[in-house]
Amino acid sequence: MTASNAPTLLDTVTVPLGDRSYDIQIGNGLIANLGTVIAPVLDQKRTVIITDENVAPLYLETAQNALEAAGIQTQAITLKAGETTKSFQSYQNLMDQLLTLGVERKDTLIALGGGVIGDLTGFAAATLRRGVNFIQVPTSLLAQVDSSVGGKTGINTPHGKNLVGAFYQPRMVVADISVLNSLPKRELQAGYAEVVKYGLIDDPDFFNWCLANGSNIFNGDHSAQAYAIATSCRSKARIVAEDEREGGKRALLNLGHTFGHALEAECAYDGTLLHGEAVAIGMVMALDLAARLGTGSDTEKDLLTTHLRDVGMKTRPTEIGRKFTSDKLLHHMEQDKKVEAGKMVFIAGGIGRAEVRKDVPVDMVRQVLDASLCS
Ligand SMILES: NC(=O)c1ccc[n+]([C@@H]2O[C@H](COP(=O)([O-])OP(=O)(O)OC[C@H]3O[C@@H](n4cnc5c(N)ncnc54)[C@H](O)[C@@H]3O)[C@@H](O)[C@H]2O)c1
Ligand SMILES: O=C(O)C(=O)C[C@@H](O)[C@H](O)[C@H](O)COP(=O)(O)O
Ligand SMILES: [Zn+2]
């Protein structure tokens, strides 16, 4: 290996889950050295890479060469890019292909891509032969800061987002920040929404860091990117370690998602609205709700809105170019996985003070929706 292609490991975050604990390795050039990076967690040297049609031409060959150089057998499956790939149909096709390849229990699936590939591959890994190993190699900012960590896997259904899935942890997460150079700006912005989320949940200092430095993430500043990824992953790892299966505190990671998932479902996952874009709008609505509940303020909502707009993001459903109604959005929200005894659960609080609220009157939710739909 020459000095120019040696990997640089910038940080390692551990997700502490007893005998299912795993590391998130954050660095540069990790995909070009994937074989040596992942070898310690493989049960046998046989892998299948699952990726998408945008990522494959950029990074598949590099990943395959690196695995082969380390004596690890590998095959590849390339899927269509985009949210529609998180469907029953692609899940079935993927399972057929994996079984045709003769994947064994001790083989390892490698998700090389964004959150769509990670969520689908994770669900396939959880269910194939009742569970095979998998490794996340996230290539979008969103996947590096959020979806590759914590073991939520699954697919969408016409009833709503992620309604079929499993909690199933990867053996390792390999976040190579050099791949963010090829990520389109719109995708970086979508991922950035989930970065800001960690500040809003319980880390006002990190929120302030975002206000001051967040825009550097879009300028290709690797140190800002690495800091944002490591801080986000540390925050998520801490919450997941406390409440892996979302009995309580993990719901905080859903900040903005009850509203956001409803917007996504109304757009039928057709690419009009990316997940992170929906979360950005949903977080503004969640802060509006907090202001109405008295646990946050309009000033905090405005601060978030201004920051998201400063980095070029939309903050209102009216900017999407689709007609939404409160009734239809409420209908989707009733399908949310946090619903208890028929009552919706929200994450609402001021900046750095998110709380789980089970006592929100439906009328107040409707006021938030109505206000956002006519602003
Ligand atoms: N499991 C979780 O905890 C969790 C958390 C957050 C989001 N999610 C899910 O993640 C999904 C969204 O993930 P996403 O935003 O990564 O979307 P995505 O997987 O669709 O990736 C975004 C786009 O960028 C392309 N891409 C990815 N990496 C690239 C790179 N390095 N260079 C160029 N193009 C690249 C992809 O092909 C795709 O077109 C949603 O389905 C969401 O529900 C899951
Ligand atoms: O990991 C979690 O927990 C999250 O809620 C992270 C979210 O960003 C992510 O979008 C998640 O998939 C949403 O979870 P869901 O249970 O509402 O589908
Ligand atoms: Zn999310």
Image (cartoon, helix red, strand yellow):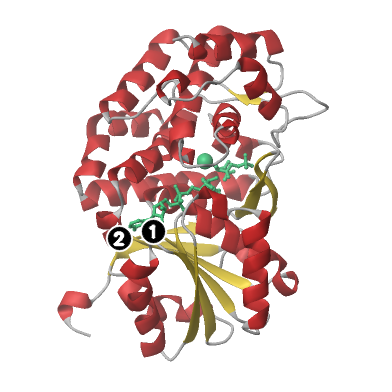
Residue type for callout 1: Thr
The residue sitting at 35% across, 83% down in the picture is 65
| 97 up-or-down from 345: above or below | below
Q: Is residue 250 visible?
A: yes
Residue 145, placed above or below residue 266: below
The three-letter amino acid code for the residue at tag 2 is: Val
Q: Residue at x 20, y 49 (%)?
A: 220
> What residue did someone put label 1 on?
139
Q: Is residue 168 above or below residue 84?
A: below
What is the distance, in whole Å, between disc 2 and disc 1 at their CAs?
6 Å
Residue 29: x %, y % from top left: 28, 69
Residue 31, image x and y in percent? Answer: 35, 71
The residue sitting at 62% across, 46% down in the picture is 242
Residue most toward the right? 341
Mark 1: secondary structure: loop
* Pointer 2 with pointer 1, Cβ within 8 A: yes
Q: Earlier in the sequence, mark 2 or mark 1?
A: 1
Percent x, y of residue 27: 31, 63
Give the quadrant of the N terminus: bottom left
Name the quadrant containing residue 71: bottom left
Which SS class for mark 2?
helix
44 on left or right of 59: right
Is ligand 1 within 8 Å of the beta carbon of the residue shown at mark 2?
Answer: yes
- The picture places residue 96, in percent across and down from the top left corner, at 67, 73
Mark 1: C-beta under 8 Å from nearest atom of ligand 1: yes
Q: In this view of the protein, can residue 168 be seen by the observer?
A: no
Front residue of 80/134: it is: 80
Quarter of the C terminus within the rendering: top left
> Is residue 363 depicted above or below 220 in this figure?
above
Q: Nearer the viewer, residue 192 or 320?
A: 320
Residue indicated by mark 2: 179
Question: Of residues 213 and 334, which is closer to you in this image?
Answer: 334
